[in-house]
Image (cartoon, rainbow, N blue to C red):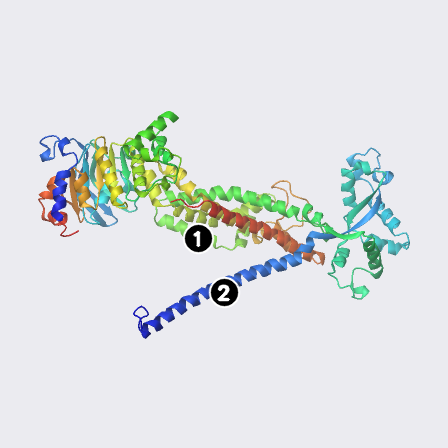
C-alpha cells in the first residue's frame, strides 16, 4: 500500500516531461522566492529553526510534515500573513525576486498582491460570485471599466475551472456554492489579482475526494503560469501535484528535494520514516 | 430482560439522569413563567389604570360667537381674535344653558365645571374658523379635572358633600347635562397635543415626546459614530497589550457606573464648564450619550468579534489595507449586530430619568420644544413629575404616559429583534 503510492508518485509526477532535462539536480529552474536562516518565534516558543528553502518559478513546491511541524508557519512567512499574529517574530531572509519581503520599504499590501493565498477552509466573502472575484482587481485598481472587469472575472473563473458551473449565476452569493466550488472560487479570487506566487494552505483538507481531484488538476494547470507553494497533510497529494517537496519536522526543514527523490529515495531517515508512514 | 434495557442498576441510574433533565426543564419553564406573568401584570395594571387617560369628560355648549366680545378690532386679524374675551362668552353660554342659575355663588360653581383651559380652546377654534363669528355653534369643551374624575367614577359618589370636589348642585347640573347628551367621555386630544400644564385636563405629553425625540437624536448622533469608531479601533486596529487591556477594563467599568453619576458629570461639564443652556435636549442628549457610549462600544465589539477571522484573512491575502478590510468586509457583516446594540442602548437612554434630573430637565415646561436648545423634558421625567402631583387626575395621566413610554420601548426592542432576524448571518 505504502509502496503503491510512492510508485504512483513517480509515475504521475505532473509535468515531469516539462521539467528541463538535467533537472535532476533541482537547481536549474530559476528561483522565484528564496529563504535563508528563517527563524520564527511565537512569544518564546520557536516555531521554525534555520529554514532555508528555495521556491522555483512555475513549479509546485509541496511542504509536508506532521501537525505542528511549522510548514504552515513557513507558508505564512512568504506573504507575511504572520504579521497580524500577536507575538510572532520572524528573522532571517525571505526574498521575492531577490528582494527581501521583510525589508523596511516593503508594503505588505503590495507584497500580497504579488503573493496570493488560498486557505484551508474555503472562505468566500458573503458577496456574489462576481464580487468575490472582482474584489481584488477592484481594490488594486487593475481595471478601467466594467467590460474589463467582466473580462478579468471571466478569465479568473475560467482559469480556476469554475466558469462553466457559475457563468449563469454570477449574481448568486459565493457561499451558495458547494465546498469544492467555493475553494475554486477562492482560487479564482486569488489569481484575479495576477499574483506571481500562489500559496495554498491545505486547500483540500476540507473537501471530498472528487473535489480534491478537481483542485489537484487545477494546480497542475496553474503551475504553467504561477509559482505554487502548497502545504498538505496528504503525502499522496504532495506526490501527485508537486515538483519539489520539503519535509518539515519539529520546526526544522529536514529534507528538500525533487518530489520523486523525496518519496522514493530520501536521504534522511526521518523523511523515510514519514513518507513510508512509520510516524507522523 | 432485554440487553437494551440494561441491568437494574443501570436502569436506576438512567432514571435519575432523566429526572434531572426533566427538573431542569421545569426550572426553565417556571422562570420564564414568572418573568412573563410579571410583565403581563405590569402591562395589565398600566393599561387598566392608564387607558382612561386617553378619554376625557367633555361638555357640549351652544357658544354664541359674539363679534364685539371676540373681535375687539373688528378686522378678523389673528391679533384681534387673540384679545377677545372668551371667558365672557363662556359665561354667556353657561347662563343660556342653565337659565335657572342666578345666584352669584352658584354661577361661579357652574363656571367651575369647565376646564380653565376652555377659553383657550375656544380661541384656538375661532382662529381656525373665523367664519363662525356672529354665529352660534355647538362646541365640545373640556370639563374640569374634578368633573372628569366624577364622570369616570374615580370619586365615590356617596361621599359626604364636603369631602368631595363636586357639590350636590354641580352633580345635579352634570346629571342634567348627561341626560341631554351634552356630557360625554370623548377622545382626549389635549393629552396628545399639549405640553405639560397645571390643569390635569389640559396637560399633555407632546412636549415630553418631542423632548425625548430631540434628546435621543442628540444621543444617537454623538454616541453612534463615536461608539462605532471606538469599537472598530479597539477591535481591529489597536495592538493588544497592557494599554488595550487597561482601556477595555475601564470601558467595562464605565458601563457599570450608575446613571446618576453621568448626570453629575453632565452638570459639571456641560452646564458649569461649557455654559450650555439648562434643561435643553442638547445637554440631555450629550449626557445620555456619555452614558450609552460604553454599552454601545461593548455591543459593537461583540458583533465585530463574531465576524470570522477567515473573512479578514481572505481580504488581507488579496492585499486589502487594514481600513479596506474593515470597511468592505467586517463592518457590513457586523452591521446587524451593531444596529441591534444601538437600538437597545437607545431604548435604555429613552427610559432614563436620573441623569436628566441633574441637568435641569425636571423643570415644569409648558411649551413644546422647537429645537434642541429649548427647555424641555422627556417622557420618563414627565411621568416622574406627574406621579408627584397632588391632583387626583394626574394619577391616570401618569399611567397613560407610562403606557405611551412602554409602547415606544417595546416598538424599539421589537425593531431590534426584527433586524436581527431579518439579516441572517451568511457564513
Outermost residue toward the front in this view: B2
Tell me which corner region of the image, top left, top right, bottom left or bottom right, holds residue A110.
top left
**On the rendered image, what quadrant is the C terminus of chain B found in?**
top left
- Mark 2 sits on what residue? B30
Task: Indicate the position of residue B14 as horizontal and vertical percent values.
Answer: 35, 70
Q: Nearer the viewer, residue A224 or A172?
A: A172
N-terminal of the pair, mark 2 or mark 1, is 2
Q: Is residue A256 visible?
A: no
Task: Indicate the position of residue A20 as horizontal and vertical percent values.
Answer: 12, 30
Q: Secondary structure at mark 2?
A: helix
**On the rendered image, what quadrant is the N terminus of chain B found in?**
bottom left
Task: Indicate the position of residue A103 as horizontal and vertical percent values.
Answer: 25, 35
Tell me which corner region of the image, top left, top right, bottom left or bottom right, holds residue B396.
bottom right
Task: Indicate the position of residue A9 as horizontal and vertical percent values.
Answer: 14, 41
Q: Within 10 Å of the Cα at label 2, are there few (<14), some (14-19), or many (20+) other Cα atoms?
A: few
- Numbered marks: total: 2
Q: Within 10 Å of the Cα at label 1, are there few (<14), some (14-19), or many (20+) other Cα atoms?
A: some
Outermost residue toward the bottom in this view: B8
- Mark 1 sits on what residue? B252
Q: Is residue B60 left or right of residue B408?
A: right
The chain under label 1 reads: B
Q: Nearer the viewer, residue A215 or A252?
A: A215
Amino acid at each position: 500500500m505504502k509502496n503503491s503510492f510512492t510508485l504512483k508518485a513517480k509515475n504521475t509526477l505532473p509535468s515531469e516531461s516539462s521539467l528541463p532535462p538535467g533537472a535532476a539536480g533541482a537547481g536549474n529552474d530559476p528561483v522565484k522566492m528564496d529563504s535563508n536562516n528563517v527563524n520564527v518565534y511565537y512569544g518564546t516558543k520557536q516555531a521554525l529553526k534555520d529554514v532555508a528553502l528555495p521556491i522555483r518559478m512555475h513549479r509546485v513546491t509541496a511542504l509536508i510534515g506532521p501537525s505542528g511541524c511549522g510548514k504552515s508557519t513557513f507558508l505564512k512567512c512568504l506573504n507575511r500573513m504572520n504579521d497580524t499574529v500577536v507575538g510572532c517574530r520572524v528573522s532571517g531572509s525571505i526574498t521575492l525576486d531577490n528582494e527581501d519581503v521583510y525589508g523596511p520599504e516593503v508594503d505588505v499590501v503590495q507584497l500580497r498582491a504579488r503573493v496570493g493565498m488560498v486557505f484551508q477552509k474555503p472562505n468566500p466573502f458573503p458577496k456574489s460570485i462576481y464580487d468575490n472575484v472582482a474584489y481584488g482587481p477592484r481594490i488594486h485598481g487593475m481595471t478601467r471599466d466594467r467590460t474589463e472587469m467582466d473580462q478579468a472575472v471571466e478569465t479568473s473563473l475560467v482559469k480556476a475551472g469554475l466558469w462553466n458551473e457559475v457563468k449563469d449565476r454570477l449574481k448568486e452569493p459565493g457561499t451558495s456554492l458547494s465546498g469544492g466550488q467555493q475553494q475554486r472560487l477562492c482560487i479564482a479570487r486569488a489569481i484575479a489579482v495576477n499574483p506571481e506566487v500562489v500559496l495554498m494552505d491545505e486547500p483540500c483538507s476540507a473537501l471530498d475526494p472528487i473535489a480534491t481531484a478537481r483542485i489537484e488538476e487545477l494546480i497542475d494547470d496553474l503551475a504553467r503560469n504561477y509559482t505554487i507553494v502548497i502545504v498538505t497533510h496528504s503525502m499522496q497529494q504532495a506526490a501527485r501535484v508537486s515538483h519539489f517537496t520539503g519535509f518539515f519536522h519539529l520546526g526544522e526543514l529536514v529534507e528538500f528535494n525533487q518530489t520523486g527523490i523525496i518519496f522514493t529515495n530520501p536521504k534522511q531517515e526521518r523523511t523515510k520514516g514519514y513518507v513510508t508512514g512509520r510516524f507522523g | 430482560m432485554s440487553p437494551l434495557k440494561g441491568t437494574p442498576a443501570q436502569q436506576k441510574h438512567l432514571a435519575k439522569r432523566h429526572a434531572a433533565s426533566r427538573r431542569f426543564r421545569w426550572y426553565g419553564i417556571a422562570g420564564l413563567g414568572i418573568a412573563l406573568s410579571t410583565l403581563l401584570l405590569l402591562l395589565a395594571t398600566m393599561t387598566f389604570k392608564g387607558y382612561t387617560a386617553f378619554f376625557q369628560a367633555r361638555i357640549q355648549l351652544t357658544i354664541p360667537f359674539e363679534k364685539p366680545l371676540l373681535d375687539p378690532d373688528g378686522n378678523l386679524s389673528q391679533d384681534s381674535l387673540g384679545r377677545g374675551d372668551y371667558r365672557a362668552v363662556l359665561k354667556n353660554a353657561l347662563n343660556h344653558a342653565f337659565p335657572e342659575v342666578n345666584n352669584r355663588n352658584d354661577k361661579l360653581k357652574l363656571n367651575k365645571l369647565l376646564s380653565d383651559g376652555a377659553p383657550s380652546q375656544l380661541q384656538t377654534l375661532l382662529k381656525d374658523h373665523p367664519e363662525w363669528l356672529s354665529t352660534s355653534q355647538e362646541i365640545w369643551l373640556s370639563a374640569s379635572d374634578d368633573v372628569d374624575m366624577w364622570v369616570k367614577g374615580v370619586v365615590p359618589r356617596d361621599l359626604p358633600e364636603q369631602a368631595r370636589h363636586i357639590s350636590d348642585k354641580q352633580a345635579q347640573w352634570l346629571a342634567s347635562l348627561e341626560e341631554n347628551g351634552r356630557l360625554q367621555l370623548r377622545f382626549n386630544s389635549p393629552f396628545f397635543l399639549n405640553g405639560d400644564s397645571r390643569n390635569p385636563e389640559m396637560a399633555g405629553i407632546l412636549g415630553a415626546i418631542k423632548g425625548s425625540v430631540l434628546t435621543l437624536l442628540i444621543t444617537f448622533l454623538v454616541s453612534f459614530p463615536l461608539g462605532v469608531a471606538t469599537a472598530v479601533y479597539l477591535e481591529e486596529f489597536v495592538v493588544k497589550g497592557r494599554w488595550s487591556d487597561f482601556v477595555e477594563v475601564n470601558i467595562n467599568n464605565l458601563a457599570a457606573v450608575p446613571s446618576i453619576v453621568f448626570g453629575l458629570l453632565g452638570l459639571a461639564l456641560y452646564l458649569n464648564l461649557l455654559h450650555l443652556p439648562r434643561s435643553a435636549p442638547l445637554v440631555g442628549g450629550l449626557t445620555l450619550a456619555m452614558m450609552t457610549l460604553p454599552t454601545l462600544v461593548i455591543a459593537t465589539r461583540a458583533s465585530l468579534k463574531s465576524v470570522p477571522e477567515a473573512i479578514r484573512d481572505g481580504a488581507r491575502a488579496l492585499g486589502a489595507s487594514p481600513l479596506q478590510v474593515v470597511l468592505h468586509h467586517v463592518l457590513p457583516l457586523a452591521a446587524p449586530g451593531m444596529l441591534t446594540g444601538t437600538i437597545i442602548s437607545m431604548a435604555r437612554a429613552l427610559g432614563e430619568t436620573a441623569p436628566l434630573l441633574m441637568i435641569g430637565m425636571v423643570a415644569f415646561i409648558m411649551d413644546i420644544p422647537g429645537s434642541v436648545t429649548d427647555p424641555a423634558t422627556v417622557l420618563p421625567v414627565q411621568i416622574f413629575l406627574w406621579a408627584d402631583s397632588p391632583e387626583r387626575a394626574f394619577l391616570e395621566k401618569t399611567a397613560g404616559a407610562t403606557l405611551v413610554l412602554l409602547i415606544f420601548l417595546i416598538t424599539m426592542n421589537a425593531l431590534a429583534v426584527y433586524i436581527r432576524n431579518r439579516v441572517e448571518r451568511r457564513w
